[in-house]
Image: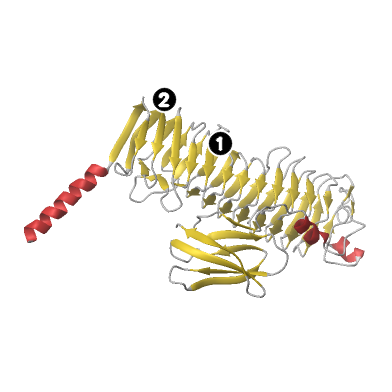
Amino acid sequence: MKKFTILLAFLSAITALKAQTNVSGGIYSSQTWTTAGSPYIIISDVVLFPGYSITIEPGVVVKFNPNTYLEIRGRIYAIGTPNDSITFTSNLTTPYMGCYGGITGSDTSFYRYCSFYYADTAIYGMTGYDGELSHCTFKNNFNGLNFSYITADSCNFYYNGCGLYEAGNIFYCNLLHNGLAAFNVGNVKYSVFKHNGNGLGVPGPQAFIDHCIIDSNRGYGLMTQPTDTVTNCEIEYDSIGVQSQSSTIFFNIISNDSIGIIEESGDDIRCNSICNNKEYNFILSTSKDIHIYDNYWCLSDSVLIQHTIYDGHQDLSLGLVYFTPYDTFQCTQITSVQNLVQQNNYKVYPNPSIGVFTIRNYELGITNIAVYNVLGEKVYSNNYQLKTIDLSKQPSGIYLYRITNESGKLLDTGKLIINH
């Protein structure tokens, strides 16, 4: 019996060794990387040549030796599932940020439910506009996306040096604990920028930043350039809420930052709630006078409002800020609700995540969100309208959420997937 057990263990070890697939050099025909062959080890630089594709099955793990990369001149189809994602990571026992190159030149490729860890740049040069990047997680990379102009849809960017640099649109994404969350990107909607060194920096010309949470970033929360438009965002607890260059800023809540807005030029700042910022609600950084009317300052006295604004009254080299008439009804809250156009009343994103989800309610009135584990135990409950909930201390797995109104009527239910 003992010999049989030893033999079984030996055969299992051999089987495990056979499951590993080493990859190096040029790939000159289309391939499918299967779960049976996983993990695939990039032992030296790999180039997929034009006209060919790599299809990666759900559950496959691709590991990179130090300083290696995978160059895609053809196409890659990495389509995982919510319960069986595809992983790209280091082959080191103790990996560290940037220990391998990553994936480069992946024009018109498809990544769905994939996770990318420890690369120098996880994906570089993904410029094919008919490709896909959705429900993916980027963690502990120097750069998540770099010069990749694809839309990141429902993705997570955690603990990267930079989440996205010179990239495309960002929709329904979480960007948390990065050195720089995103810089020089396209339109940004329904996304969360929280606990980064700097948040969202210099979106592209005429970019729209809409319905985002920008919160608790150590530097700036949002840095805009001329012709950008910022609407319906909650910008709070940053060092600088908004550093603006003649941008259009309507219907936002900008509060509890050290400095609410630093404005270089421009007058299109209206109907915002600009309140309770520690040093100044507003700083003018140009000699030009500007008019910012119909904003709500949480104060009813113009003299007190003026004390929260830094302009030519404090520094003679600066222009003057004319803020009257000012709003007394917080029109930002009314308008932001009235302007919502959404077929479904609830949106949960990103999902899966490492445990941080945004649940947005498009119904008027107070509702409650409750989350249960597989044993039926309630692990979270709170009233909300726009709520980021943190379940990161819960173990990986599937959770059920229930949304009810004040009378207890069930309004919506669904699954949350935590994948640490």
Counting the numbered discs, the total is 2
Residue 355 seen by the camera: no
Give amino acid for label 2: Phe
Is there a contact, CB below 8 Å, between mark 1 and mark 2? Answer: no
* Circle 1 residue: 148
Q: CA distance from mark 1 to mark 2?
A: 19 Å
In the image, residue 170 sits, relative to residue 54, either above or below, namely below
Number of residues whose C-alpha sits closer than 10 Å to that of mark 2, classed few (under 14), some (14–19) or many (20 or more): some
Residue under the image location 70 percent in, 57 percent down: 235
In the image, residue 241 sits, relative to residue 152, either above or below, namely below
Q: Nearer the viewer, mark 1 or mark 2?
A: 2
Residue 129 rendering spot, x and y as whole percentages:
58, 33
Q: Nearer the viewer, residue 387 or 220?
A: 387
Q: Nearer the viewer, residue 332 or 202?
A: 332
Residue 279 seen by the camera: yes
In the drawing, what numbered circle is on residue 405? none
* Circle 2 residue: 49
Number of residues whose C-alpha sits closer than 10 Å to that of mark 1, classed few (under 14), some (14–19) or many (20 or more): many
Find numbered disc 1 in the image and state the secondary structure of the residue it sits on: strand
Residue 73 rendering spot, x and y as whole percentages:
46, 27
Give amino acid for label 1: Ser
Q: Nearer the viewer, residue 128 or 166?
A: 128
Residue under the image location 77 percent in, 51 percent down: 262
Residue under the image location 60 percent in, 53 percent down: 197
Q: Quadrant of residue 57?
A: top left
